[in-house]
Image: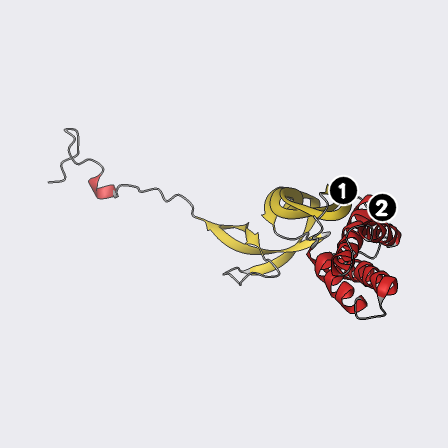
Amino acid sequence: MKKNLLVLSLISLYGSAFAADFTDTARVISSTPIYERVTEPKRECWTETVQVAPKERSMGGAVVGGVAGGLLGSQVGGGSGNTAATGAGAVAGAVIGDRVSNPDSNRSATGAVVGGVAGALLGSQIGGGTGNKAATAVGGIAGAVIGDRVANPDQPRTEQVERCRQVDSSREVIKGYNVTYRYNGQNITTTLPYQPGSTLRVGVSVIEDQQDQRYEEPQGRRYEGRRDRPNYQ
């Protein structure tokens, strides 16, 4: 009988053992990576500068503040001084009330003051006595509001806005390696999930060649069924 060597398979560093007669080392001829494209969702964000419509300013604070200031001013002095105090209190109250109800640190108060004084002067020309003081207060309040709106007109403002979107991002990953190694005079190619290096271990098994057995008819039966067989009687 003749015995031959048969390479069963690779002995992987991570795999389980299998039935092999012995192990040996094979030389690696080539190792080529196998790439696979993987698609993953990705969130992209950026910042944009956009124009925003101006916020409408309320006049409620200016009116309430002006009335309160005018009432307080009317308690001061008498005659024309009392009228002046009423107008001054109305202007001051309107400016303060407007700033409280419409907070904006960038607004100038100059326009409101100038307009309030002008409005109070105009109002003081109307009527007399209590009516004159009321007209002065109303003129001061209206002038403060109008002067503020003229000096600080509503304008579109800019602000930073974050925009985001989801996109598909693809990349290539190494799935494994096509490895060709040489053993017992043969080149063998297989796939491994790792890069083996210059050598790798293989499991080897020994098999036997069965010789053909020839059947010969026994000597005593060689002439059975023939007419010319000899007669030994």
**Any mark on residue 224, and which?**
none
Residue 187 location (% of width, % of height): 63, 42
Residue 156 is labelled as 1
- In the rendered image, residue 36, in percent from the top left (x then y), is placed at 62, 43
**Is residue 214 something one can see in this rendering?**
yes
Asked which secondary structure carries label 1, the reply is loop
Q: Position of residue 121 (x, y in %)?
A: 85, 52
User: Looking at the picture, does residue 202 appear above or below residue 71?
Assistant: above
* Residue found at x 57% / y 56%: 203
Q: Is residue 203 left or right of residue 159?
A: left
Report if residue 176 is visible in the image: no
What's the residue at 71%, 51% (across, down)? 57
Q: Amino acid at mark 1?
A: Pro
Please state which amino acid type lies under the numbered disc 2: Ala
Tell me the residue that label 2 is attached to.
151
Could you say which is closer to the camera, residue 156 or residue 135? 135
The residue at the far front in this view is 128
Of the 4 image quadrants, the one containing the C terminus is top left
